[in-house]
Amino acid sequence: MADTVYLNGVFLPLAQATIPVLDRGFMFGDGVYEVIPVYNGQAFRLDEHIQRLQASLAAVRIRNPLTTVAWRAMLLQLIAENKALQDQSLYLQVTRGVAPRDQAFPPESVAPTVFAMSMALQTPSTALVQSGVAAITALDIRWDRCNIKAISLLANVLLRQQAVDEAVAETIMLREGWLTEGSSTNVFVVAQDKLLAPPKSQHMLTGVTYDVILELAASHGIAHLVAPVSEAQLRSADEIWITSSTKEILAIISLDGQRVGQGQPGPLFQRMYALYQDFKNQYMRHTR
Ligand code: PDD
């Protein structure tokens, strides 16, 4: 982790960044967050992440403490402060602020707490991209507002640990027989040469990477369908992919111990992975 972080208007060393224990983020998990990848000093899809942050804040009725221009400026300065890191993963979080413990909202006068830090971005190694990874399934035990990027992640923590305990990379969730997403990723499947993606809903986070994948499919003539994906479709898929800002795209080659497709990253995965890397590089040159 790099040293300089942002807390409530000030850039300071991580070790000096402290918040009161009555912060509602600490008390209730009452806040929202974003994770933004930075390649070579360029934030990837920054505006989309800021827009999703705004949507999360509005959904939980926390006042947006900064303008879009101020968010951009703060994050660009944070990137510059941590430029010793080649690629970065920005984490930012806004909580409902510090107030005596009571579930109801505090008075308007209580300012949200704003925190942001930069970590080294660790995308999957070439070896993992080439080999693919294993996953398990589990019931989606989360709430009904999964489109909000909330910091209260207890269910995700338990689901992700289930994967770690079983020595696999991700837990893929099913709700009433339908695919929702992974514990910290979106999920795509390939069946009969067509890419299938569950539609945006309150049961999954609208991933910034998810949107990029669907845009690339559309612009490169890859057959795709955004429609609910059943458990049967997931289990019989030729390919399964997981996507996120930090994992980019990874192929799932085994699900609950059963081989997926040929048991190796499939041809459509190879194609999309290459398109994603090209797009990423092009986008970064373009915004420089
Ligand atoms: N997680 N679904 C969930 C539940 C997630 O937590 C994430 C991202 C995604 C993918 O979203 P995006 O493509 O915008 O990164 C889907 C981040 C990386 C995290 O919590 O660390």
Image (cartoon, rainbow, N blue to C red):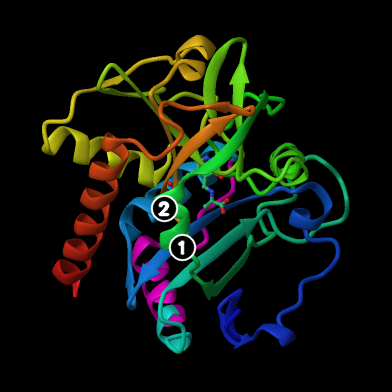
Tag of residue 182: none
**Distance between mark 1 and mark 2 Cα atoms:** 6 Å
Q: Secondary structure at mark 2?
A: helix
Amino acid carrying label 1: it is Ser
- Picture coordinates of residue 36 (x, y %)? 44, 61
Pointer 1 residue: 125
Query: Can you tell which quarter of the image residue 191 is in?
Result: top left
User: Relative to 194, does residue 182 appear above or below in the rendering?
Assistant: below
Pointer 2 residue: 129
Do the residues under discs 1 and 2 have CB atoms within 8 angstroms?
yes
- Picture coordinates of residue 48 (x, y %)? 34, 51
Count how many numbered circles sit on residues in the image: 2
Extent of the magenta region: 61-78
- Picture coordinates of residue 97 (x, y %)? 71, 59
Query: Can you tell which quarter of the image residue 50 is in?
Result: bottom left
98 on left or right of 212: right
Q: Looking at the image, which residue is at 36% across and 15% down? A: 227
- Picture coordinates of residue 181 (x, y %)? 53, 31
